[in-house]
Amino acid sequence: MTSTGTAAPAAPVLHKTAGGNAAYHNFNNDFAHIQDPNERRRLALAEIDKAPFGWYHVRACVVAGIGFFTDSYDIFTAGLLTTMLGIVYWKGGKMPTNSDTAIKVATSGGTVVGQLGFGFLADVVGRKRMYGLELIVIIFATLGQALSSNSQSMNIVGVIIFWRVLMGIGIGGDYPLSSIITSEFATTKWRGAMMGAVFAMQGLGQLAAAIVLLCCVAGFKESLLTATTYAKCTGVCGLAVDKMWRVLIGFGAVPACIALYYRLTIPETPRYTFDVARDAEKASDDVEAYINGKSEGHPDAIRRAQGIQGADRMVVPKASFKDFLAYYARPKNAMVLFGTAGSWFLLDVSAYYGLSLNNPVILQAIGYSGGPTVYKQLLNTAVGNTIIVLAGAVPGYWVTVATVDTLGRKPIQIGGFAILTVIFIIMGFAYDKVKGADGHGLLALYVLAQFFFNFGPNATTFIVPGECFPTRYRSTSHGISAASGKIGSIIAQAAIAPLRVRGATKTNANPWLNHVLEIYALFMFLGIGTSLCIPETKRKTLEELNGEDDSIVENYPSEHQLREQKSAAADASSL
């Protein structure tokens, strides 16, 4: 009772949860006294941003990374696949250039559809609902491809193209989903390293493809020794190669099957639940669930219904097509999208896919694909690919992981484009001198190019689009950026790379390869310009990068003031 004889006002009811608080920090109880959804959002997301690096971060990287391992494996095997299909299904032992290009372009064509489609749907229906579906598509298409064959009514090239387009759709969906899910769950301090580690699994996927081919060659050694050239690889030799390409392609479904369960059970990202679903209660509980290793939070139904009714108080704009157009109508935002999409386009049109998907051609040019027998030729191809990946690609990926949160994304990307420009100028304009008699000079430059692709724009063009856009359009924007890259790769494969065989003769199968490298050098140089349009994102929160929290930070109290408010509320409830 007060001195006037009237009853004291009732303290606000705090809907706290009980049990397990000694084992785990209960973030839900921390924020139960805060009624404003904007402030609950800010504090809950701060817990993710400031959380110490733990096993749940490792789990997120592994689950996302296995998908990229599979993606890279499937893409990298395209060049090996066309080589072996040529041996099995063509009398001369070599697939026509048009068929070779069509199979390689098919995957990129499907990838564009997957990146745009899955990217858009992840913003509309949620990350959790879409994550895992892309792996199901990849598994189904991989098995269908491995079981394909020629017939009187069906051409093997057409069948393979169909399955690779479908597989490409699944691969494309993995790009925006894995990037943004890792980004939205990551701690701010190590977000670049986490996203880089996911992308670095591409290097291990390439290495695995080379090792599987090496194992297949060793396993069928006796059969492959019976033929001296691809054209003469018939009978037991042809049967062996037919089995080899099926094993090589089919193995790509194995890691996808392993990761599928974990992707289907991953929790929705709290940022999506806050900003798009606008369910503050569920999002707060999901933060606690994620850090405690659970699939999702389970808030009180009454509190959740009340929170959804009060969602109109959220300061973050609601996603809509009109808002999307208004957001990108601002020159600053449009310039960022131009920087991410343009850099990815120039990278892929100029080098990564133009070279990597044609590794057998590069290996032939530097002397790692010849031999007196089919066994020796395929063995050199497998060993040569292993050397290139280990010497250039894998180290480049992991140097990026180690330095991206200290050096920053922008310096690594600009520096990578600059170094690659120099390398391709040397490779293009001094091709004959660099190649020499043994090809070792060209091999050295090619390995350096692979290193600075991955310790450079190949990694950062994946990382930055997952950070610099608002949550409500992050997946769509990443999908647009990634699709721009794949469109570039289609141009590289369909229009630029085939120029290498212009004027080909029996003694020189790739007379225009030096000019193709010169074209690549130009696009590398242009990439420096587009990289100037992207922001530096290291050690900044996602909300800070896209300005979503500006008004909240200005209009709401500090965490110290909130602790005082919480203490006052607790004192009032104890009276």
Image: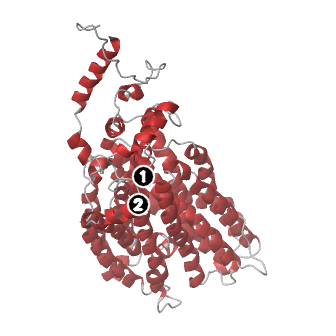
The C terminus lies in quadrant: top left
Q: Between residue 131 and residue 381, name the one nearer to us.
A: 131
Q: Amino acid at mark 1?
A: Ile
**Residue highlighted by disc 2:** 478
Residue placed at 51% from the left, 64% from the top?
117
Q: Which residue is mark 1?
A: 180
Q: Is residue 277 above or below residue 449?
A: above
Few, some or many C-alpha atoms within 10 Å of disc 1 (few <14, some 14-19, many ≥20)? many
**What is the crowding at mark 2: few (fewer than 14 residues within 10 Å), some, or many (at least 20)?**
many
Q: Residue furthest front?
A: 5
Please say if 166 is above or below 263.
below
Looking at the image, residue 102 sits to the left or right of residue 204; the answer is right
Q: Nearer the viewer, residue 462 or 312?
A: 312
Instruction: Say how many tags the image has.
Output: 2
Tell me: residue 452, above or below residue 432.
above
Look at the picture and state if 10 lies above or below 289.
above
Closer-to-camera residue (223/64): 64
Classify mark 2: helix, strand or loop.
helix
* Contact, mark 2 vs mark 1 (Cβ under 8 Å): yes
At horizontal 55% and vertical 69% (from top left) the residue drawn is: 110
Q: Quadrant of residue 449?
A: bottom left
Q: Position of residue 430 (x, y in %)?
A: 31, 81
- At 28% from the left and 52% from the top, the residue drawn is 545
